[in-house]
Amino acid sequence: MIRLFEAINLTDRNSFHVRQSAERLVEFDTAADVAAIFEQWKPARWMVLSGGNNILFTRDYEGLLLTPVSQQIQLLEEQDDEVVVRADAGVEWDDLVAWAVERDLWGLENLSLIPGKVGAAPVQNIGAYGAEAKDAIRAIHWVDTAEGCRVRVMAVEEAQFGYRESIFKHALKGRAIITAVDFALHRTPQPRIGYGDVEREVMARGGVSLHNIREAICAIRRFKLPDTAVLGNAGSFFKNPVVERAVAEALLAEWPEMPHYATADPERVKLAAGWLIDRAGLKGYRRGAVGVHERQALVLVNHGGATGEEVIALADYVIEQVQARFGIRIEPEVNIL
Ligand code: EPU
């Protein structure tokens, strides 16, 4: 089904809660709906607006926004240990995680409570606590707007997944509309509790179980990350920078306690942007309606009534300060429009 909104206020459709509007927004369920929308409006400018959790509007959107709202989750097949599940793009991500945990299916629990919808998960390959969406994704169903809205299926190997990266941010940007995602989950326990405080929080809940891992992750997130319903934000505003090994070593000589993580490339090391911003003295920094979150410096927040421009000005200041202090240029992770 298609639902059209014109001159729509987007304040409640972006997690930063900036007050911008769009010329037209259409909610859709299926790939056939997408084809009908393109047939009817032939939009010159369009974009998918899913949960609006990773986006910062700095102006009104002059074009057509497409929002998936279909919410089905289906168990497709089960073979030995593996269970394939299909979730529509409009399913709330955490509803899918809860659904899997309730059915004793392993694979998504570390990604508990990430805000957003299923259709957005492959785009930036959402990740947290030692897991990434790509570890569980098997295939992506999408509509190819460059080929007459043909329905296509992409295997995980074709998605060019990387740290907060996929083909949907590059070659297929402005072309693909994701309608559903297939996940391969497991009956056999596959606990991943090595990241940060996860093990301690899991043990405090009585030991390793699917339920306890989910609860531990939810507790850590609730403590560190602001609830978008209360304080507008888009999660991590910046990506963690990946630098040459020599650069990391030089910084470690000065700050031995600096968090750093190996990457697939032995010559490159990932640093924690949150730590860099924090050590640049900006955690909890506030400027008018915008600020750096007081418990996780990687998150910029709207204390109320902020414009996108104010958030950008703060982000630029944070980038400059980190550059001045550490010589590293951090980059936004959020989509800026
Ligand atoms: N740190 C500080 N001060 C801060 C923030 C972090 O010193 O203000 C230190 C922490 O103590 C830790 C390190 O930096 O040693 C990393 O911090 P954390 O574990 O909180 O993770 P992160 O690298 O800041 C990433 C993701 C988060 C995800 C967490 C947990 C990115 C851009 N962000 O943050 O994802 O929840 O790991 O896995 O990769 C998101 O993308 O919106 C998001 C919240």
Image: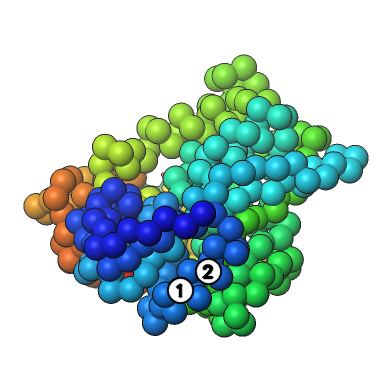
Residues marked 2 and 1 touching at CB (< 8 Å): yes
Q: Position of residue 244 (x, y in %)?
A: 51, 74
State the residue position of label 2: 36
Separation of residues labelled 2 and 1 (CA atoms)? 6 Å
Q: Based on the displayed image, in which of its 4 quarters is residue 55 positioned?
A: bottom left
Residue under the image location 61 percent in, 82 percent down: 147
In the rendered image, the quadrant that contains the C terminus is: bottom left
Q: Amino acid at mark 1?
A: Gln
- Element class at badge 2: helix
Q: Amino acid at mark 2?
A: Ala
> Farthest residue toward the right?
80
Q: Position of residue 116 (x, y in %)?
A: 46, 49
* For residue 309, above or below residue 209: below
Horizontal side of 131 relative to 60 (left or right) equals right
* For residue 14, above or below residue 325: above
Q: Position of residue 211 (x, y in %)?
A: 62, 26
Residue under the image location 90 percent in, 40 percent down: 80
Residue under the image location 66 percent in, 62 percent down: 140
State the residue position of label 1: 40
Q: Is residue 150 visible?
A: yes
Horizontal side of 286 relative to 138 (left or right) equals left
